[in-house]
Image (cartoon, grey):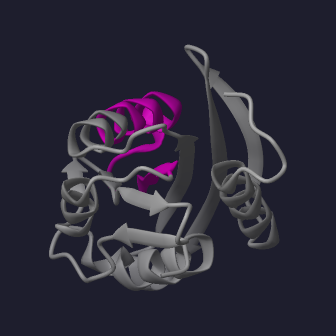
Amino acid sequence: METGAADPVRAYLDGTARRLQADGCEVRTEDWNGLPVLVGYRADFRMQWMATKLHLFTLAAPAPLVTAGAIQDFTSSALDYVVARKGQLRGMQSGVAVFPALVGTNVEPEAAAWAQRGQSVRFAAMARPVVVDAGTGTAACFRGYAALGLFYSAHFRRKLAAYFPA
């Protein structure tokens, strides 16, 4: 997606890359079938997480129209991606999580509502989808506590606030 310096989507993605780097994430852009996807990665270990290591990915992509179906599909693809990347590390002492974010200036309310409902969970892998209206700077996502992955909830809330300010 070609964008100009004044494009709010590109500006938001560039700001997200800076916020990820400031938090110590490895940051790069990958080509997903012609779609430039910002990829941030960090791993954290905490004794209070029952001595587990959490591999946290942030995947952010531009979207001309953000719909509920688009964020659902992107979330599913993001979970597939992180499971494939860290598949052998999942399980009792290691987990993966992802913040799949679609960023656009044309956001359907249903997309934001879906992202705020909760997290998607697979075995030792969680996703908290994010829908960003780059025109207003609004980031819609689940910022609450979830029963599955409860140990990580406060960490997720802090990282979401740092990467996608409300």
What are the residue bounds of the magenta stretch? Answer: 75-104
Side of 9 relative to 88 (left or right) = right
Residue 159 position, x and y percent, is 54, 75
Verify whether residue 45 appears in magenta.
Answer: no
Total count of labels: 0
- Residue 112 sits in which quadrant? bottom left
Considering the image in quadrants, where does the N terminus appear? top right
Q: Which of 151 and 64 is in front in this view?
A: 64
Residue at far right of view: 5
Residue at left 28%, top 53%? 108
Side of 6 relative to 148 (left or right) = right
Q: Which of 69 and 148 is in front in this view?
A: 69
Residue 87 visible: yes
Residue at far top of view: 33
Side of 72 relative to 153 (left or right) = left
Residue 65 position, x and y percent, is 40, 40
Verify whether residue 97 appears in magenta.
Answer: yes
Q: Which of 6 and 25 is in front in this view?
A: 6
Residue 93 visible: no
147 up-or-down from 13: above or below:
below
Residue 20 position, x and y percent, is 71, 64
Side of 48 relative to 145 (left or right) = right
- Residue 69 sits in which quadrant? top left
84 up-or-down from 82: above or below:
above
Residue at left 74%, top 72%? 23
Residue at left 52%, top 32%? 85
Residue at left 55%, top 53%? 58
81 up-or-down from 136: above or below:
above
- Residue 73 sits in which quadrant? top left
